[in-house]
Amino acid sequence: MNEGYIAKNLSRKAEDYLEAILNVTLEKGYARTKDVADQLSVSPSSVVEMFRKLDTLGLVEYRRYEGVVFRPEGQKIAEVIKYRHDTLKKFLLLIGVAERVAEADACFMEHELNPETVRRIRLFLETMDGDPSFCEQIQTEIDRRLQQKQSNSK
């Protein structure tokens, strides 16, 4: 996968929809309007509007009453966005960010960070996966410093 690839002309919103379509498809094997609406907490009519736009861009094939299926370019973009999201969320969790916050921040950061930055974070995470004790040391040290700062601010 070319993890640095992002279509320059897509909005964050369009990228979010592609990622949601991929997530729903991975979970259920298909992506219907209602499922994507639930994933993104938006109305079904908003989803249909974006499905039509993504269809026009050649990224998905919208089938009324059935949902969407990816075209190759849309699949590639969605996979890159998911890769970026998963990498960033895992990093944020590693450094002790709460799950809910890590999810929200990863959603924002996935659109903003340079591909090289994401690639480096992924390499860092892979290194940490190779040495779980070092990973634990980092997490322990972060927790210790947080507690120390909280004690000093009282």
Image: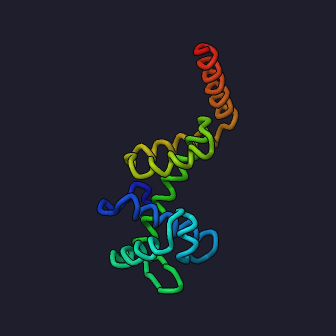
Residue 26 percent location from the top left of the image:
60, 69
Left or right placement of residue 83 versus residue 134 in this view: left
Question: Looking at the image, how many numbered discs can be counted on the residues?
Answer: 0
- Indicate whether 54 appears above or below 152: below
Task: Find residue 97 and report its image quarter.
Answer: top right
Left or right placement of residue 29 versus residue 114 in this view: right
Say which of 45 and 69 sits in front. 45
Which residue is drawn at the image coordinates 53% and 85% (left, top)?
66
Which residue is drawn at the image coordinates 49% and 79% (left, top)?
68
Which residue is drawn at the image coordinates 62% and 29% (left, top)?
138
Task: Find residue 54 and report its image quarter.
Answer: bottom left
Which residue is drawn at the image coordinates 50% and 48% (left, top)?
106
- Indicate whether 95 appears above or below 142: below
Left or right placement of residue 22 versus residue 140 in this view: left
Q: How is the image coloured?
A: rainbow
Say which of 123 and 51 sits in front. 51
Residue 81 percent location from the top left of the image:
46, 58
Q: Quadrant of the C terminus?
A: top right
- Indicate whether 11 appears above or below 117: below
Residue 29 percent location from the top left of the image:
61, 76
Task: Find residue 28 and report its image quarter.
Answer: bottom right
Residue 122 percent location from the top left of the image:
51, 46
